[in-house]
């Protein structure tokens, strides 16, 4: 299989999606990871009201010229919750790419709000790229972020969420799958969770219809949503927050799906399945860094991607 580090380097510096020619057809997961492309985003959504998502963080690379690649949510004044594959894409040799920045407090990721850097990161220790599972991570801001009426952490819900629950996903980008260039305006998609067994079967059927391999859905660790054909998450929305519409608490993290809005479910990392990991992450940097370092030493591994780097 194509080395994922090489994939990340090509994407980050050339802003392209890798050709599938060098990857086994059965295990080519690039179609699902295209959520991190800057070219596509929420399909069939509506522009967010100003200040309605003060927790939303736009993750971008570059200085004068910025390239948006993932969303995230502010869960403390220093901690951004996002997808694990978003963190992995900007982490090389135990360090974050220096040009990585977050922007919060604006509906326009290219302007306004507060832009900040990062000094630490963690990916869930059991994150699997091959199966897109345990797909969550956290980024530690370089300094505490000053809260205002436009910048607020999102409350998390660790209650188990079932089917037919009204939810809202928020991200930056397109309102149509084929529109170009993508919008810089924050978009809301109002949708609902679906029954786990229905999700499993729908994903299997869609994969068969497309003639591709799809990761298995894990209902214990993933939430599925579906609105209708023409409405759904798409490339670039990875890491963004899924909220219950009644309590406005975050219950999921955009993880993977079939691009784009073709009538198949969207998959989100289930927040309630990772309470200990997330709560430990809120205690950054010293407590969680030391704990994860000890875990890695106990496993006799030198993999730096599962522990924090704090310069």
Image: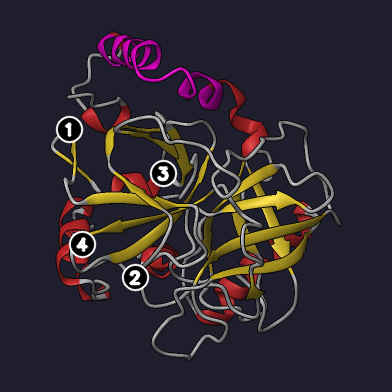
Crowding near pointer 2: few (<14 within 10 Å), some, many (20+)? few
Q: Earlier in the sequence, mark 3 or mark 1?
A: 3
Report which residue position mark 1 lands on: 94
Q: Position of residue 250 (x, y in %)?
A: 67, 43
Q: Nearer the viewer, mark 2 or mark 1?
A: 1
Query: Secondary structure beneath disc 1?
Result: loop
Q: Residue at x 35, y 19 (%)?
A: 285
Q: Quadrant of residue 50?
A: bottom right
Q: Residue at 18% x, 54% y: name it.
A: 3
Residue 216 position in % (x across, y down): 57, 53
Please tell me whether mark 2 or mark 3 is closer to you in this view.
3
Q: Is residue 166 above or below residue 21?
A: above
The relative height of residue 222 versus residue 305 in the rendered view (above or below) is below
Q: CA distance from mark 3 to mark 1?
A: 15 Å
Q: Which residue is mark 3?
A: 84
Sequence order check, earlier mark of 4 and 2: 4
Kindly identify the residue that appears in the image at 15 percent across and 65 percent down: 13
Report the span colored magenta. Answer: 277-297
Would you name the residue on which mark 4 appears?
12
Query: Marks 4/1: CA distance?
Result: 17 Å
Determine whether label 4 and label 2 are within 8 Å by CB: no
């Amino acid at each position: 299989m194509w080395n994922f580090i090489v994939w990340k380097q090509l994407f980050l510096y050339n802003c392209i999606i890798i050709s599938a020619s060098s990857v086994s057809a059965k295990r080519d997961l690039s179609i699902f990871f295209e959520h991190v492309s800057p070219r596509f985003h929420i399909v069939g959504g509506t522009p967010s009201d100003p200040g309605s998502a003060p927790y939303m963080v736009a993750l971008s690379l570059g200085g004068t010229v910025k390239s948006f690649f993932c969303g995230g949510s502010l869960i403390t004044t220093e901690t951004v919750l996002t997808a694990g594959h978003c963190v992995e894409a900007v982490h090389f040799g135990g360090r974050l790419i220096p040009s990585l920045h977050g922007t919060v407090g604006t509906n326009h990721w290219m302007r306004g709000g507060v832009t900040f850097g990062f000094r630490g990161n963690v990916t869930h220790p059991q994150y699997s790229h091959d199966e897109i599972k345990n797909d969550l991570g956290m980024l530690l801001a370089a300094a505490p972020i000053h809260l205002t009426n436009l910048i607020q952490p999102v409350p998390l819900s660790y209650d188990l969420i079932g089917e037919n629950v009204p939810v809202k996903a928020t991200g930056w980008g397109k309102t149509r799958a084929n529109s170009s260039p993508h919008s810089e305006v924050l978009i809301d998609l109002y949708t609902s969770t679906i029954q786990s067994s229905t999700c499993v079967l729908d994903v299997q059927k869609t994969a068969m219809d497309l003639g591709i391999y799809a990761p298995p859905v894990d209902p214990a660790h993933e939430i599925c949503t579906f609105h209708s054909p023409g409405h759904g998450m798409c490339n670039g929305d990875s890491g963004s927050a899924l909220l219950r519409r009644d309590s406005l608490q975050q219950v999921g993290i955009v993880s993977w799906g079939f691009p784009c809005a073709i009538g198949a479910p969207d998959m989100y990392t289930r927040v309630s399945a990772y309470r200990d990991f997330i709560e430990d992450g809120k205690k950054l940097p010293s407590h969680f860094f030391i704990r994860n370092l000890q875990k890695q030493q106990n496993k006799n591994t030198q993999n730096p991607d599962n522990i924090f780097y704090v310069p």
